Amino acid sequence: MSDTPQTTHLGQASSLPASPEEARLDYVPNPREGTLYLVRFAAPEFTSLCPVTGQPDFAHLVIDYAPGETIVESKSLKLFLGSFRNHCGFHEDVTVGIGQRLAAEMKPRWLRIGGYWYPRGGIPIDVFWQSGAPPEGLWVPDQGVASYRGRG
């Protein structure tokens, strides 16, 4: 792997991709390759569109991963997640799809995603996916997002 990151967005003006398929995720060499550690991204204002009504759906996403050879460049991740604003998809498909794409492209030692979706029709939907069992010795904190609670 080259020591020089090849990025599309870093340090440049970038527009929001029209769709997740058009979004390019950039990866850079892991500066601590061989060290077991956890990286967390939180996207508390994630938005996609309901495939039935076309109305916006909102979620708090938490992405945890143990890097392998690369780490995802955060600006490209932000643009990728933002591209879902125009994407119709069920909560399950969106959440799992984000996790699977990151895992497939970045090839982390381990990755999990929690999608804490705000209620639609009075029912909150939480979706979780992980690439497998976490590596032995990895500290994996709680994702810190409380279950949705109404007035009960």
Image: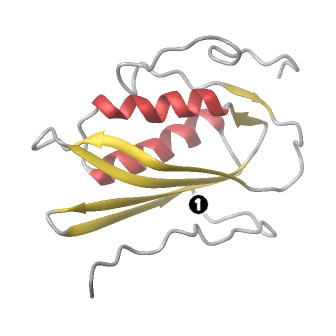
Q: How many marks?
A: 1
Which of these two is toward me, 52 or 45? 45
Per the image, label 1 sits on a secondary structure element best described as loop
View extreme (bottom): residue: 152
**Height in image: 26 above or below 91?**
above
Could you classify mark 1 by the number of other residues whose Cα lies within 10 Å: few (under 14), some (14-19), or many (20 or more)? Answer: few
| 37 relative to 77 in the view: left or right | right
User: Residue 116 placed where, x, y %?
Assistant: 40, 61
> Mark 1 — residue?
132
Instruction: Determine the residue positioned at 70% across, 68% down.
Output: 140
Quarter of the view holding residue 49: top left
Instruction: Determine the residue positioned at 89% across, 47% down.
Output: 34
- Which of the image's four quarters has the C terminus? bottom left
View extreme (front): residue: 151
**Height in image: 55 above or below 87?**
below
User: Residue 16 placed where, x, y %?
Assistant: 44, 20
| 87 relative to 141 in the view: left or right | left
User: Residue 61 placed where, x, y %?
Assistant: 48, 53
**Height in image: 115 above or below 10?**
below
Which of these two is toward me, 53 or 68? 53
User: Residue 84 placed where, x, y %?
Assistant: 36, 34
View extreme (left): residue: 53
Instruction: Determine the residue positioned at 29% across, 29% down.
Output: 86
| 114 relative to 1 in the view: left or right | left
Q: Amino acid at mark 1?
A: Gly
- Which of the image's four quarters has the N terminus? top right
Q: How is the image coloured?
A: secondary structure
| 131 relative to 32 in the view: left or right | left
Which of these two is toward me, 46 or 92? 46
**Height in image: 137 above or below 8?**
below
Quarter of the view holding residue 92: bottom left
